Structure formats: structure tokens, C-alpha cells
Image (spheres, rainbow, N blue to C red):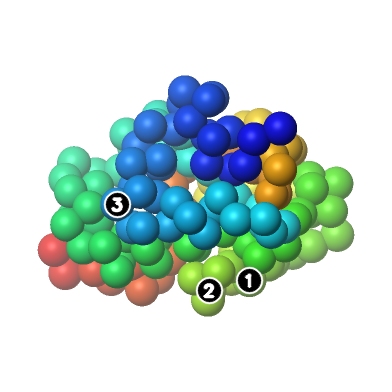
Amino acid sequence: MADIVDTLINDGRFTTLVEAINRASLLQGLMEPASITLFAPTDEAFSKLPSGTMGIFLDNPPELEKLLTYHVIADRIASTDINSLSSTPTVEGSTLTLNTSEGIKVNDARVVEPDVESDNGVIHIIDTVLVPQSVSELLVAS
């Protein structure tokens, strides 16, 4: 099995996410032996962001890091475990809201493919980029 980054690369639907992880210097952290959960937005999810949004993030590595670490949980959480959770803290420091009343939702994102296993964690593929409050304020200012 591959680590989280190689799993994303091999899948082919995450070129924007992998580029952002690389630009934010988070590659090594997501390749280390650990037990993490990544809510991974697809390229299609990134394309839903307003025009120019990714350019703002790519030009601002600290804010890009906040955006990306908002998608990471410092624990392996399988989809079956999400049923017993209403929220979970992120590596970024904020909290994600979890809802399983109609499938699995993370904040406003729908999990379209749960439980993609990797050597160092689990990936849940989501249809929307999660944006923490601190970063959304940057977008409004821009």
C-alpha cells in the first residue's frame, strides 16, 4: 500500500490538491508514518472555488497551509466511526462538523467516496473544498 500522498497521486483526481500540498511544504508530513484522516477534495471540488481563489492561496503559503491542514485530522477515522461523532478537531486548529443523516457530510461537503486506505491513514474523498473561518476572511479581504 502507498502513503497518503502517493495514493492521491496514483488516483489521478487530485492534481490540484497535490500541487497545493507541495507548495505549502506539507508533502513530508503527509508521507510520514502516522495515523491521520484526510478529507480530500477532488480537482472538480477545487474548480467550484471562485475564480482566482487558488491563485491567492498559492501566492500565500501560510494561508494555503491553514486551508490544507483544515482537511486533516490527527487520527484515523473510518466512515463507521463518523456515525458516533458530531464534530472533530483539525490539524489547523478549528473543528469540522460531521453529519450522517443523509450519507456523510463534513461541514457543507459531501463524502463521495469514504475509506480509501493508505499506509499512514485513511482518505475520505469530498466534493467541496473546506474553508476555515480564518481563511474565508482572507478571501473576503482579497
Q: Earlier in the sequence, mark 2 or mark 1?
A: 1
Q: What residue sits right under mark 3 in the picture?
A: 23
Residue type (three-letter) at the residue carrying disc 1: Pro
Does the CB distance between marks 2 and 1 fall below 8 Å? yes
Name above or below for residue 103 compared with residue 88. Answer: above
Mark drawn on residue 89 = 1
Disc 2, SS = loop
Which quarter shows the C terminus?
bottom left
Count of marks placed on residues: 3
Dividing the picture into quadrants, the one containing residue 66 is bottom left
Which quarter shows the N terminus?
top right
Q: Earlier in the sequence, mark 3 or mark 2?
A: 3
Q: What residue sits right under mark 2 in the picture?
A: 94
Q: Earlier in the sequence, mark 1 or mark 3?
A: 3
Q: Residues within 10 Å of mark 3 (few under 14, many from 20)?
A: some
Q: Position of residue 32 (x, y in %)?
A: 60, 55
Q: What's the distance in space between the residues labelled 3 and 2, CA to CA?
A: 22 Å
Q: Position of residue 46 (x, y in %)?
A: 36, 39
Q: What's the distance in space between the residues labelled 2 and 1, CA to CA?
A: 6 Å
* Horizontal side, residue 119 vs residue 53: left or right: right
Residue at the location (64% across, 47% down)?
A: 105
